Image (cartoon, rainbow, N blue to C red):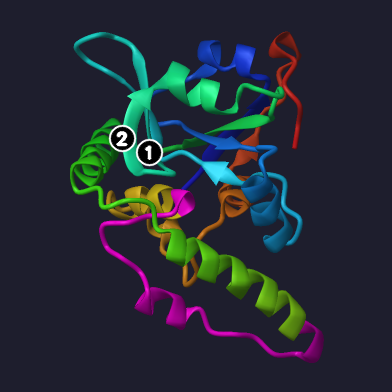
Amino acid sequence: MKTTIYRKTISQILPNLQEGDSLAWRGNSLLAKIIRWADNNSYYNHVDGIVYRDTSSGFWRVIRSWNGGVEDISLYQALESYDKEDNDVCIIRPFCKTEQIKKRILWLKEQVGNNKGYDHKLLLLHLLWLKGNKFLSKFGLSLSEVFLYKFDNVNKYVCSELYQWSCIEVGLEEFKKDKLMTPQNAVDFTKINGKTLCDTKFNLKRI
């Protein structure tokens, strides 16, 4: 599986969007900073499920797991969520077939209908697991992630979990990892399995 990633300012996102893209964000809230701190001082702290174009209105929409759970909102609403302090954003583009993109959208829409709220418990446990493993690694030890899934709610998602499972559900085998992805994992995954594009016409930055 190959992916393409663009890092851009928010005002430059629209000309480069394609259906099936996902957005990874760097926020400035306290929670955003805690997520990055726990994730080995990562750069990004949130990833959306998918961006798609509504067939009836023609407008862009975003499906993501947010504070209230899985939601289907307009792209402008999503941008306004983060467009307060010129936060950095990546466009993450899995290279998959059109049919796979359609299936991802359908699956994600089902999760909106089944929404039971945001999985705050899993987020907390995952952050503790990340930080705990970093400490234990100093002694050559590691903590199994298996215990996290004992507390997992099938109808609740953290943001990166929603993104990861949307890819797994359509047969993107590379996303079947032993551990739960973080938003930064999604970005780093692109560097390893795909490529980053640098186009001076759009002032893209290579990362």
Could you say which is closer to the camera, residue 74 or residue 178? 74
At x 25%, y 41%, the residue is 112
Q: Amino acid at mark 2?
A: Ile
Quarter holding residue 27: top right
Taking the image as shown, residue 107 lies to the left or right of residue 157, namely left
Circle 1 or circle 2, nearest the eye? 2
Image spot of residue 155 (x, y percent): 26, 57
Dividing the picture into quadrants, the one containing residue 41 is bottom right
- CA–CA distance between discs 1 and 2? 7 Å
Residue found at x 59% / y 74%: 129
As shown in the figure, which amino acid type bears the numbered disc 1?
Cys
Q: Return the mark for residue 81.
A: none
Q: Are marks 1 and 2 in contact (CB under 8 Å)?
A: yes
Residue appearing at x 35%, y 26% in the figure: 73
Label 1: state its secondary structure: loop
N-term-proximal mark, 1 vs 2? 1
Read off the residue under disc 2.
Answer: 101
Q: Residues within 10 Å of mark 2 (few under 14, many from 20)?
A: many
Mark on residue 96?
A: 1
> Quadrant of the rendered structure where residue 107 is?
top left
- Circle 1 residues within 10 Å: few <14, some 14–19, many ≥20: some
The x and y percentages for residue 94 are: 46, 39
| 134 shown above or below 60 | below
Percent position of residue 205, x then y: 76, 26
Residue in the picture at 72% in, 21% down? 204
Q: Which residues are magenta?
A: 137-160
Q: Does residue 97 appear in this view?
A: no
Is 53 situated above or below 36? above
The quadrant the C terminus occupies is: top right
Asked if the stretch drawn in magenta spans residue 159, the answer is yes
